[in-house]
Structures are given as structure tokens and as C-alpha cells.
Image (spheres, helix red, strand yellow):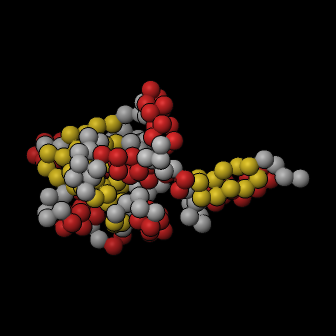
Amino acid sequence: ARIEPGDTVAVMGCGPVGMCAMTTARLWGPSKIVAVDINQERLDFAVKQGIADVGVNPNNGDAGDVIREMTEGRGADRTIEANGFKPTFDMAIDAVRPGGNVSLIGVFEKPQELAMNTLWIKNITISMGLVNANRIPELIKLIQAGKINTNFLITHRAPLNDIVKGYDIFGGKKDGCLKWVVTPYQR
């Protein structure tokens, strides 16, 4: 996302991918991390855990307008789309400042159309790509050093006996579930 110290970073999506993006974005010293999601429970969790500084729910008003209001009319310096959906992609483009960067880390199921005139007029840079496996050792060292906290990801644990229940809760995003760890079968 090319984050620089003092940047305002808005992340569209408070699922595990978005929260990990916010957590690692913090390493570059942004002045503010804004979480954007329609799931108020996840927004509240991100702010309470210190993953985000503020949460914006698009159901309560236009996210781009709210972010511009926070940034004296500019928009976020960097936006990160972590869902892989057209509405959040459009939101990331709308909420970024002129000359800003939109990073796409969400996986899109369908090809996307680009609003070329908007991208050109706002001079937006788009970056994207899969996780670089060569950086995993660096991430592990950061986690071991306590610079990246991933403990928040595991919200549920249960034995293999309860896998169907767990999949229902995880798949349905119920009970605040981010990640469900399956423990050994219990007799």
C-alpha cells in the first residue's frame, strides 16, 4: 500500500484479511487507520482491540464522505480493499485522495471494470498482488518480536466433534467469529 508515516489509511473490510492489513499497516506509522465495514460488530471489535483508530459503517452514511470529513476534505492517503467485491472496490477509489494509492488484497471472483476517467483525473495508483511467500520469515520474526499481534484472529476453539457447528458459526460470521481453531477429537 506504500504507507508512509503520518498517512491516513482506510481499509475496506474487517474480516481476517482486512484486520491483518490494518495490523501490518501500523508498522509504517500512519496517523490514523480507518476500518470500513457494514458489520458493526467487527468494526467495534477492530477499534476495541486497537487494530483501527475509528470505524465507519457505510450503512450509516457515505464512507467516502465520512473519510473526507476526517481528513479536511482530502480523503485517505491509502485505501486497502480487503473484500473482493465491486462496491468496496468503488468505495476504495472514492475514499482515496487525489494522488493516493488503492491496494487490492481482496480476491475478486469476477473481472472488474475500471472507472478510467476517475482514476486518471484523481491520479490514483492501483497496486495488487498475492502474498509474497518470501516475506513469511520476516512476518514470523515480527510476530515473535511482538511487533505484530495476531492473537485477536482466533476467536473460537472447539474439538473436531463440533466441526459442523464450527463451520456454521465461521461461515455465517456468527458470534463474532474471525477464525475457528479445531482441536483434537474428544471422546
In this rendering, position of residue 141 left or right of residue 89: right
Q: Residue at x 63, y 53 (%)?
A: 180
Total marks shown come to: 0
Which residue is at a point 24% across and 63% down the rendered structure image?
Answer: 67
Q: How far across and down, in percent of the image, does residue 72 sit?
A: 14, 64
Quadrant where the N terminus sits is top left
Q: In the image as oriented, which residue stretches furthest toward the right?
A: 187
Q: Position of residue 20 (x, y in %)?
A: 44, 49
The one nearer the camera, 173 or 52, is 52
Q: Compare residues 149 and 13 and report the one nearer the observer.
A: 149
Q: Is residue 86 left or right of residue 146?
A: left
Q: Quick one: which residue is furthest to the front in this view?
A: 145
Q: Residue 9: image x %, image y %?
A: 28, 53
Which residue is painted at 21% across and 66% down in the image?
70
Outermost residue on the top side: it is 134
What residue occupies the far left of the structure in this picture?
A: 121
Residue 123 placement: quadrant:
top left
Tell me, yes or no, if residue 154 can be seen here: yes
Vertical position of residue 117 compared to residue 65: above or below: above
Tell which of 50 and 125 is nearer to you. Answer: 50
Q: Position of residue 144 (x, y in %)?
A: 51, 41
